[in-house]
Image (tube, rainbow, N blue to C red):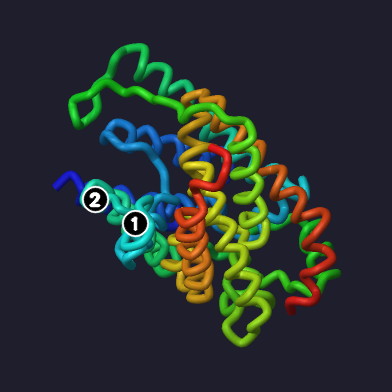
Amino acid sequence: MDIINWISQPWHWAIGGLAIAALSISMTLMGQKFGVSSSFKVLCTWAGAGKRIPYFRIDTKGERWRMLFVAGGVLGGVISAHLLRSPEPVAISDATIQYLAGLGIDYPASDETGMGFVPTTLFNFANWKGILLALVGGFFVGFGSRYGEGCTSGHAITGLSHLSLPSLVTVIGFFIGGLFMTWLVLPYILPYFL
Amino acid sequence: MKNLAFFLIGIPFGIIMTKSEVISWFRITEMFRFESFHMYGVIGVAVAVGAVAMFILKNRHVKTWTGVEVSYTPMPFNMKRHLLAGSLFGIGWAITGACPGPMWVLLGNGFWVILIYLVGATIGTWAYGAVADKLPH
């Protein structure tokens, strides 16, 4: 079908941005705000974190919509990988590919290696150092998003759409942390994690 | 029933995250290295269109499904907290190349190693809950 082929090809950034806006507007009209990171708080509550920590004593019934939303997101990922697979890998700039090659990180452009989504040379179950780094990275994402009450969806998309100042400062923080890591830390430590 | 609708809208969410390539670790590295406009384009368009839409929805007092008008209450402003929390998140974002939404979507795309991100993020959330009262808010 033509429409399937059309969706499957790599999207222009403007199409991606429009689609994300449509999603956040739809969710607003459905009475909720586009936000994902609170799903981790619900996981903590489900795992019994509320026994010792009052912060996690929440009624997860009110968060059921969010967990169903992320479950739908997982299914959307499955559909993308199987039915809407792009014929080409993610078109990363040559400068980035060269820079990463210099650190020993391959650009996984083939179908088997994942079409440019995850740096499989670094993050794979056979590389315990990479797994440790992934765990630390995930920790910062979880800690930072809860402390800041939101992640990219809640602050960069929803918050900025409402011209919220706390969201703007938080997004500036995302870049302070991200630029610090990308320019001053990762180039020096990544080779040791391979 | 309404919860089911959120599951259904989650499906295009997963597809959009994948097809707009924001789930790619390489796109995030490229963004922080300023070597491509892609991520800035995606987020910029999403925010610009979102801002116009939210303005119209609020201005016309449009009601949501739940019968209340579209509104937004920003969290209380605290410069130190936003910068610190944002920076911690940014450190994680640069390492994992995935924010929370993409983590879930990548898992659906069949990258099992992303389970480690999700475990890390859940532990990080737990740790925040444990020390929250000692941090500036």
Position of the N terminus of chain A, as image quadrant, is bottom left
The picture places residue A167, in percent across and down from the top left corner, at: 54, 32
- Side of B82 relative to A183 (left or right): left
Q: Give the camera-side residue of A12 and B67.
A: B67
Position of the C terminus of chain A, as image quadrant, is bottom right
Is B106 placed above or below B110 here?
A: above
Q: Which residue is mark 1?
A: A42
Q: Earlier in the sequence, mark 2 or mark 1?
A: 1
- For label 2, count other residues whose C-alpha is less than 10 Å away and answer few (under 14), some (14-19) or many (20+): few
Q: Which residue is mark 2?
A: A59
The answer as to whether the residues below labels 2 and 1 share one chain is yes
Is B15 placed above or below A104 here?
A: above
- Side of B6 relative to B12 (left or right): left
| Residue appearing at x 47%, y 57% in the figure | B130
- For label 1, count other residues whose C-alpha is less than 10 Å away and answer few (under 14), some (14-19) or many (20+): many
Residue type indicated by callout 1? Val
The answer to which quarter of the image holds residue B23 is bottom right
Is A54 placed above or below A129 here?
A: above
| Residue appearing at x 64%, y 83% in the figure | A128
The picture places residue A77, in percent across and down from the top left corner, at: 42, 62
